Amino acid sequence: MAANISTSQNAANGKPNPWQGAGAAEFDLRSDTMTKPTVSMLEAITHTTLLDDVFNEDPVTNSLQEYVAERTKQESGLLVMSGTMGNQVAIRTHLVQPPYSVLCDHRSHILQYEAGGVSAWTGATVYGVIPKNGIYLTLEDLQKRAVLDNDDHYCPTRLISLENTLDGMVMPLSEARRIVQWAHANGIKVHLDGARLWEAVVSGAGSLSDYASLFDSVSLCFSKGLGAPIGSIIVGSKGFINRARWFRKSIGGGVRQAGVIAAAARVAVEETFGPGPNGEGGKLKETHVKAKKVADMWTSRGGKLQNPVETNMVWLDLEASGLGPNDLAAIGEQKGLRLMGGRIVIHYQVSDEAIARLEQVFDAALSGKFERSADQSRPYGMKA
Ligand SMILES: Cc1ncc(COP(=O)(O)O)c(C=O)c1O
């Protein structure tokens, strides 16, 4: 099956890439982390500089850090190996010594999917706040849980960590602004897990710099919808980034010839997100259109959604349709699609053929004419 993507040949020797065929990204809708590097990324890697980034000497890495800092209107950037490393290093850099607490959305990645890193590395108590509107946290949600006084029963709030997009849903720029203004007026720092901030921007919610310049730190991922094989970045003030280098080093994130990572990451930002401040000229917009199409395919057959579709994720309510948590994945497997739970993630390497097969999966799932998966142990709604 020919993929409608630019990973068809190895740039250096013209041979097919080993990651084509079985396991190719075009039929993998479990996550946008499944995207594979493109020919331009591979070419950029072959032309990269290979000096030592622990010594701060690698031109391609330094240039990527400056480039992302400039595009986000922050002073400095620091390449890290993953989104988790970006969040953990940033949060550790903001915090000094307990007692203190971090407030975040109860569904957020830092709380649910980072192996308990925040409490382990910082000693902070982390409070997961439930947004009243079910979609994004508001200032009022946070004010109810913030500890601003010195009553020694409680842990003073020192950091708010927001996530945008969260489960594919957007935090409006106006709400982010209200939260940051209030937090700063109360001596609270604000970090943004912007692993998928690119997606919020492309949805029209605000420009990359409108959002990113608000926060004390932002982590952004190159290896999700943008398609780079490895890497994330933290941006913030010069002083913050200088301090963050210590924590990155302490957890083994200082790497030597980082140019191989930075070169592909640069292409991911320039070509996949795009050169414009709102992702104009990039490849993400089309994924949002496809995600809406997938949602329509599901609801027009009587299926229900768990969340509104605002970017590249579609959350199907399997339980409401009488499906077990693994049923969709099992039906998908028969059609050569890789699915996980009820979350469908559209990335730019998902082909039209994959969407056509997904339609057949929905037909089978919602008509009830399929063999139930033997393993139903996975909880509904798991992301990872
Ligand atoms: C919102 C969010 N933040 C952070 C991460 C962590 O990224 P990584 O898998 O690169 O550690 C993820 C991973 O999917 C994520 O969805």
Image (spheres, rainbow, N blue to C red):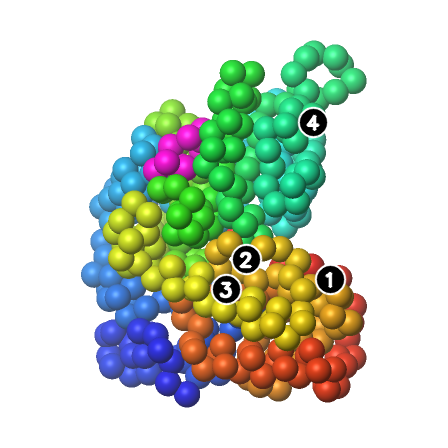
The quadrant in which residue 133 appears is: top right
Q: Which residue is mark 1?
A: 380
**Picture coordinates of residue 341 (x, y %)?**
66, 67
Q: Which mark is residue 292?
A: 3
Of pointers 3 and 1, the one earlier in the residue sequence: 3
Q: Earlier in the sequence, mark 1 or mark 4?
A: 4
Q: Is residue 139 magenta?
A: no
Q: Which mark is residue 145?
A: 4
Distance from disc 2 to disc 3, alpha carbons, whole Å, reads 6 Å
Residue under label 2:
309
Instruction: Return the x and y of residue 254 as percentages of the image width and height.
Output: 41, 44
Tell me whether circle 2 and circle 3 mark residues in contact (CB < 8 Å). Answer: yes
Image point (62%, 55%), residue name: 307
- Callouts 1 and 4 close, C-beta under 8 Å: no
Q: Is residue 137 left or right of residue 351?
A: right
Check the image and report above or below for 142 versus 280. Answer: above
